[in-house]
Image (cartoon, helix red, strand yellow):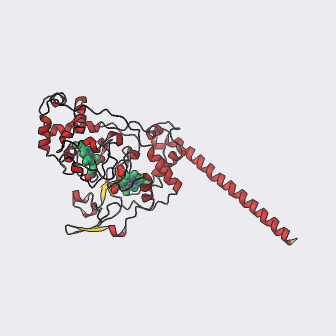
Amino acid sequence: MKNALSWTLIVCVSIFLLNNCKTTLHKDISQDQSFISKIRKLYSSGDPSLWPKPELNELAVPHFSEIGHLPKVKFPENNPYSKEKVLLGKTLFYDPRLSGSNQIACASCHDPELGWTDNKTQSFGHDRQLGTRNAMTIMNIAFAKSLFWDGRAESIEQQSQMPIQDHKEMNEHIDIATDKIAKIKGYESLFERAFGTKTVTKEKIAMAIATFERTLMSPQTKFDKFIDGQSDAFTDDEVAGMHLFRTKGQCMNCHNSGYFSNNQFENDGTGLLGSRQEDLGRYKVTGDPSDAGKFRVPTLREITRTGPWMHNGAFGTLRDVLTFYNGGNPEPPKKRATVHNGVQLVSKKSAMLKPLHLTEKEISQIEAFLATLSTRTQRLVPPGLPK
Ligand code: HEC
Ligand code: HEC
């Protein structure tokens, strides 16, 4: 009798627990669903003032602006847009005769079919020498306030001469490169149409390449359509990912504005000071020890096409990048300090980076959101090279 009673009790308790479990499980999913429907409505309302507030660190506030569409490109007054200049710039971008070996063009490392990068960990150039950094995309470059991972170039015009002269890249003196272009008959009319005279100068080469680069804008992404009011453009995971990106994931502290970068220099815990892979980043430009290991916050537009990721191409998948952030960007203890030309340098990771405690599902959702910022490869017909 006693036995039967305890059995009944056990069965009753089990049924109760099972039932309860089922209802809480359902409740969670339904709560998720109603939450996601709610934020889907707000984010796709076409009015960002209705969006939930982002979770921002106070350090991020001075450089913050909301994510959204890319604005229209502003061409500088001293180098205005013209169709003719773009054609000349595009032709030069594809012309390997700007290089010492006559074999390497800008397009060798910034290939439109590879998201305007080379999809290599680190680029190789002249004599197949390996560089130390990952080639960045030049899409939407008009919105970068400085160029290169360390910001050492201040304008696109200035930047464009640097790879030509870099011994590991195109390895040509800029004056010799200019002379070579000037001797090619077929360029005369291109220069004349772009600048009014046939004379070839290094300044004109720079201005034409820069004008072409400023036209390399992403077409509308899934993200742009979604926030414009196409509320079914996003899956539930993408909606949740956008929300996590702006809140728990803390990405908005640095990757903000329509360009998804605040154009600041931050220490992401990737400088690896004192190791063979050491990169002092911004310090080499400013000489300020607090800049050791800082890099320019890169754009996240077109991000699925531009891997491997980070200044050194250290991460082969976006999941790896996200796992790194989720752990609060851990730096190996032995790779945090170095002595450079007698100066003691210590890497100080940004105080905005902390363990995020994202679940695997949440990581996947942010990953799904990041993919909405990319567009499909556009086939681009390379220009014929003048003879
Ligand atoms: C050998 C490969 C290679 C060649 C050739 C090359 N680049 Fe690059 N490019 C890179 C790498 C690597 C970086 C990043 C370097 C760094 O930050 O130190 C870069 C960076 C850039 C950037 C900066 C992007 C940003 O977001 O700051 C621009 C713009 C650019 N290149 C344009 C050009 C142009 C124009 C040419 C031709 C005149 C050219 N590149 C030739 C590899 C190359
Ligand atoms: C403290 C500022 C900061 C925060 C917060 C931050 N990032 Fe970054 N992010 C950077 C910097 C700086 C780099 C470049 C680091 C390098 O090259 O070594 C970078 C690089 C990246 C890259 C690689 C880009 C490329 O072109 O190689 C991705 C992807 C990325 N971040 C995504 C995220 C996501 C997702 C979050 C939120 C989970 C996030 N970031 C939070 C500053 C930040």
Residue positioned most to the bottom: 2
Say which quadrant the N terminus sits in. bottom right
Report the side of 338 relative to 172 (left or right): right
Q: Is residue 254 visible?
A: no
- Where is residue 196, by image quadrant? top left
Residue nearer the viewer, 124 or 47: 124
Report the side of 325 relative to 289 (left or right): right
Q: Position of residue 236 (x, y in %)?
A: 54, 45
Say which quadrant the C terminus sits in. top left
Q: Is residue 300 above or below residue 340?
A: above
Q: Position of residue 107 (x, y in %)?
A: 27, 41
Q: Is residue 240 above or below residue 216?
A: below
Q: Is residue 321 above or below residue 380?
A: below
Number of numbered discs present? 0
Q: Is residue 48 visible?
A: yes
Q: Residue at x 30, y 55 (%)?
A: 295
Q: Position of residue 24 (x, y in %)?
A: 66, 55
